[in-house]
């Protein structure tokens, strides 16, 4: 059964919590279950806090997401003479679509080089919760 967010969806989830509590012992800890239910509600609710925060330029057909403080510890990343070695290590890995490397995650774009929109989802306090890069139709340089 597929649900869309709405009052019926939320009520069904609350009924599920009650049923699980009833069917389990009186010392049942429902903290985890309630946390999971809240996540389901949150991620099925239509998002109005999403906006484009920029674009990412791609000139190698791959994107690398990493905390900048890790770059200095990996010459494969910052040393131009070792760049080919970094790319070769990625393509020689077990998966040709993505990999964890040098403290970050590297992955292919859908269409190779281009400029791709970066979207951010914000929580109610204005902090970024999620980043999304749309590789379905990049803009050529």
Image (cartoon, rainbow, N blue to C red):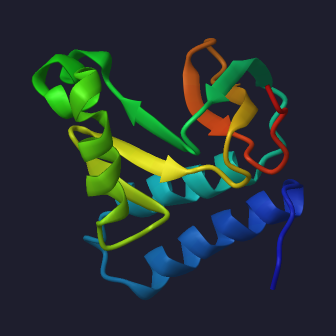
Expressed as whole percent of the image width and height from the top left, the position of residue 7 reads 87, 55
Is 78 in front, or is 12? 78
Q: How many marks?
A: 0
Q: Quadrant of the N terminus?
A: bottom right
- Measured as percent of width and height from the top left, residue 28 is found at 30, 71
Residue occupying image coordinates x 56% and y 80%: 19
Depth order, front residue of 101/124: 101
Report the residue at 81% width, 39% height from top. 138
* Foreground residue among 61 and 70: 61
Against 15, is 86 above or below? above
Q: Quadrant of residue 66?
A: top left
The answer to whether 119 appears left or right of 102 in the picture is: right
Point out the residue furthest to the top here.
Answer: 126
Q: Furthest-left residue in view?
A: 73
Q: Position of residue 31 (x, y in %)?
A: 37, 55
User: Horizontal placement of 138 versus 27: left or right?
Assistant: right
Q: Position of 65 compared to 117: left or right?
A: left
Q: Residue at x 56, y 16 (%)?
A: 127
Q: Position of residue 114 (x, y in %)?
A: 73, 34
Q: Residue furthest front?
A: 81
Residue shown at the point (22%, 22%) measured from the top left = 79
Q: Quadrant of residue 72?
A: top left
Image quadrant for the C terminus?
top right
């Amino acid at each position: 059964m597929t649900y869309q967010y709405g009052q019926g969806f939320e009520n069904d989830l609350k009924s599920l919590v009650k049923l699980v509590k009833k069917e389990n012992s009186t010392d049942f800890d429902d903290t985890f279950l309630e946390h999971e239910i809240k996540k389901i509600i949150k991620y099925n609710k239509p998002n109005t806090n999403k906006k484009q925060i920029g674009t990412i330029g791609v000139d190698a057909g791959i994107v690398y997401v990493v905390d900048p403080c890790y770059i200095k510890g990996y010459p494969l990343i910052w040393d131009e003479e070792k760049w080919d070695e970094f790319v070769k290590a990625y393509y020689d890995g077990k998966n040709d679509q993505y990999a964890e490397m040098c403290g970050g995650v590297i992955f292919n774009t859908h269409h190779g080089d281009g400029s791709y929109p970066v979207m951010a989802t914000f929580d109610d306090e204005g902090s970024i919760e999620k980043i999304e890069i749309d590789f379905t139709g990049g803009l050529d340089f």
